[in-house]
Amino acid sequence: MSYIRTEEWKERQRINATKQWKKLSDVERKEIGKNISEGKGSLSEETKEKIRIARSKQVMNNLGKKNPMWKGDKAGVEAKHLRIRNALPEPECCPDCGKEGPLDLCNVDHQYNAEKISDWMYKCRRCHMIFDNRI
């Protein structure tokens, strides 16, 4: 059962924290209180490192097609551009005119298939507009 952060949710969190606190021995409670009063977290560096490793594995296991929210070709144009920007490094200048500065991501065949990186290239805004027959 999932809860939105309502008063009911807050009360359940408070009750759970109280139950956990009651399970601790007096020595553990004193140690936690001491750490909090000294500004230390209650987790050791070793534990923090284990948490960092576990979280990075979770992130790596949810990238791309493994992510349950993956839409594939049904994704919007902006999402496809973002995928390609992450996969295709941006050159320093436009390959057509050599202009340096911000470059647009241009789809060569106008099919917007984010799986085919070879169908994408960077161009300056002017060259991109000319390529798309907009000017």
Image (cartoon, rainbow, N blue to C red):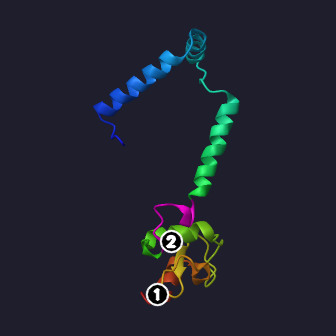
Dot 2 falls on a residue whose secondary structure is: helix
Residue at 60% across, 10% down: 27
The percent coordinates of residue 1 (x first, y second) are 36, 42
Instruction: Provide residue 126's location: percent of width, then percent of height.
Output: 50, 81
Does residue 35 show up magenta in the picture?
A: no
Snapshot quadrant of residue 32: top right
- Nearer to the camera, 34 or 3: 3
The secondary structure type at the circle numbered 1 is loop
Give the quarter of the image for residue 64: bottom right
Q: Where is residue 115 in the image (x, y as percent from the top left)?
A: 56, 77
Mark with earlier residue (1, 2)? 2
| Nearer the camera: disc 1 or disc 2 | 2
Counting other residues with Cα less than 10 Å from the Cα at mark 2, is it few (<14), some (14-19), or many (20 or more)? Answer: some
Instruction: Specify the farthest residue to the right.
Output: 46
In the picture of the structure, the residue carrying the numbered disc 2 is 81
Q: Which of 127 and 62 is in front in this view?
A: 62
* Front one among 88 and 104: 88
Mark 2: amino acid: His
Could you tell me which residue is drawn at 62 percent across and 82 percent down?
Answer: 118
Q: What stretch is highlighted in magenta?
A: 63-72
Q: Look at the image and tell me in which quarter the C terminus lies.
A: bottom left
The answer to whether 27 is drawn above or below residue 120 in the figure is above
Using the rendered view, name the quadrant where residue 11 is placed.
top left
Residue for badge 1? 132
Could you give the CA–CA distance between mark 1 and mark 2, rounded to whole angstroms? 16 Å
Q: Residue at x 48, y 65 (%)?
A: 70
Seen in the image, is 135 located left or right of residue 82? Answer: left
